Image (tube, rainbow, N blue to C red):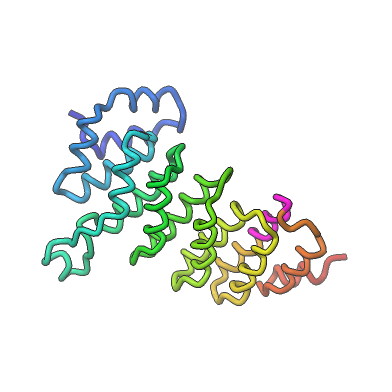
Amino acid sequence: MTSPDSLLGKIKNTKPDSPERQNIADSISHDLVTAWLNNPSWKIRNIGVKIIGELRLSEFTEILAKIVTDRTPAKLIDRMLGGDYYQVGFIRRNAAYALGCMDTAAENVTSALLEASQDRYWEVRAEAFNAMRRLYVKNVPSEILDTVSQALQDKSFEVVAQAVCTLGALATRENVVNNLRKTYDHPNIIVKTVIVETLKKLHERGVIKDKAELSSELKNIFIPGIYFLINNKK
């Protein structure tokens, strides 16, 4: 029997939506994937979650939502070593990613991602916003936008960057710029660069309608080099 680790490597050597990848998905039994998810080893469970995401096995969406929000405490010895929950941070992060790979944004998925956006592990929070960005392009619930806006104040710059990108992809009202202005003085250069790209995307999407307004907003974000280019155009 092929190990889950070897199978994941085989999957990654195929292209998404390719016949080869679909053949792999068709060959895997539901019981086998379930066994991986219930394995005592967090590494096997983690690989199982990754495989679900790569193959977009939508029948496991509800289980992924439960994994993301599972707050069963880890064993005492694991907590003494810095762990928190039975489903470790890596698994919760990859479950959030896998949810974003699915075609559904059902109510339980929305609830799971909203809870994941408050996770103590920054990578889970960041991946939750990444998943939101992929799932709610056509119809974004107001609570999603509210949560993303609040994340602009997150202590992790990686989470802030993901939140900025998500607002750029989902926001439909021009007042989103008021929220983004809260990040203009962020000390991290990656966040500042993402803000610039997000403002441009909002203009491309027609949320920022006036090009002069876009230029004005960009001038308020100081990035060495970019600031020079903006202010020295002929």
- Looking at the rendered image, the quarter that the N terminus falls into is top left
Main SS of the magenta part reads helix
Chain part drawn in magenta? 197-206
Q: Is residue 202 magenta?
A: yes
Residue sitting at x 43%, y 55%: 128
Residue 74 percent across, percent down from the top left: 17, 61
| Quarter of the figure with residue 100 | top left
Residue 223 percent across, percent down from the top left: 66, 72
- Looking at the rendered image, the quarter that the C terminus falls into is bottom right
Residue sitting at x 62%, y 67%: 180
Q: Is residue 99 left or right of residue 197?
A: left
Q: Is residue 41 magenta?
A: no
Residue sitting at x 31%, y 37%: 60
Residue 4 percent across, percent down from the top left: 24, 37
Q: How many numbered marks have been drawn onto this rendered protein structure?
A: 0
Seen from the viewer's position, the closer of residues 113 and 121 is 113
In the image, residue 132 sits, relative to residue 29, either above or below, namely: below
Q: Is residue 64 left or right of residue 129?
A: left
| Quarter of the figure with residue 179 | bottom right
Seen from the viewer's position, the closer of residues 234 and 71 is 71
Residue sitting at x 26%, y 55%: 70
